[in-house]
Amino acid sequence: LLGFLSVPVYGLTGFHMFLIAKGRTTNEQVTGKFREQGDAFTKGLMKNILYFLCQPLLPQLKSPKVKRYNVELFKKMAYE
């Protein structure tokens, strides 16, 4: 049963590894874009894989949210 259920997972994993190697999105692959003229954005097999694994982090527009707690209010709620 586990082997039967893992077939789609491995299939999709393989398909997405193929897409990474080709430098395409799922939509580009399914709709057939770049089929005739070729893809201008691909860097080649190894560079596509390296870029995916080692790509720079995108800049964030806002700083991460830091939760600040009112300790006095917490003590008042906890001990009353």
Image: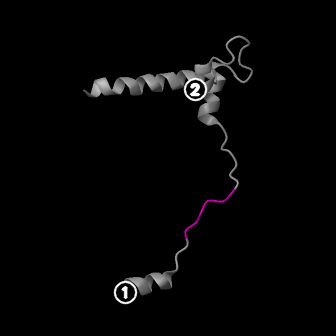
Q: What x and y, as percent, mark residue 6? A: 34, 27
Question: Which residue is at a point 38% across and 83% down the rendered structure image?
Answer: 78
User: In the displayed image of the protein, which residue is found farthest to the bottom?
Assistant: 80
User: In the displayed image of the protein, which residue is found farthest to the front?
Assistant: 31
Number of residues whose C-alpha sits closer than 10 Å to that of mark 2, classed few (under 14), some (14–19) or many (20 or more): few
Q: Which residues are magenta?
A: 62-67
Q: In the rendered view, does 2 fall on the left or right side of 21?
A: left
The quadrant of the picture occupied by the N terminus is: top left
The image quadrant that residue 74 belongs to is bottom left
Q: What x and y, as percent, mark residue 13? A: 46, 26
The quadrant of the picture occupied by the C terminus is: bottom left
Q: Vertically, is 43 above or below 67? A: above
Q: Vertically, is 5 above or below 66? A: above
SS assignment at label 1: helix
Label at residue 26: 2
Q: What x and y, as percent, mark residue 73? A: 48, 84
The image quadrant that residue 44 belongs to is top right
Q: Amino acid at mark 1?
A: Tyr
Q: In the rendered view, does 11 fall on the left or right side of 68?
A: left
SS assignment at label 2: helix
Q: What x and y, as percent, mark residue 30? A: 58, 20
Q: In the rendered view, does 44 fall on the left or right side of 5?
A: right
Number of residues whose C-alpha sits closer than 10 Å to that of mark 1, classed few (under 14), some (14–19) or many (20 or more): few
Say which of 56 and 8 sits in front. Answer: 8
Most frequent secondary structure within the magenta stretch: loop
Q: Which residue is mark 1?
A: 79
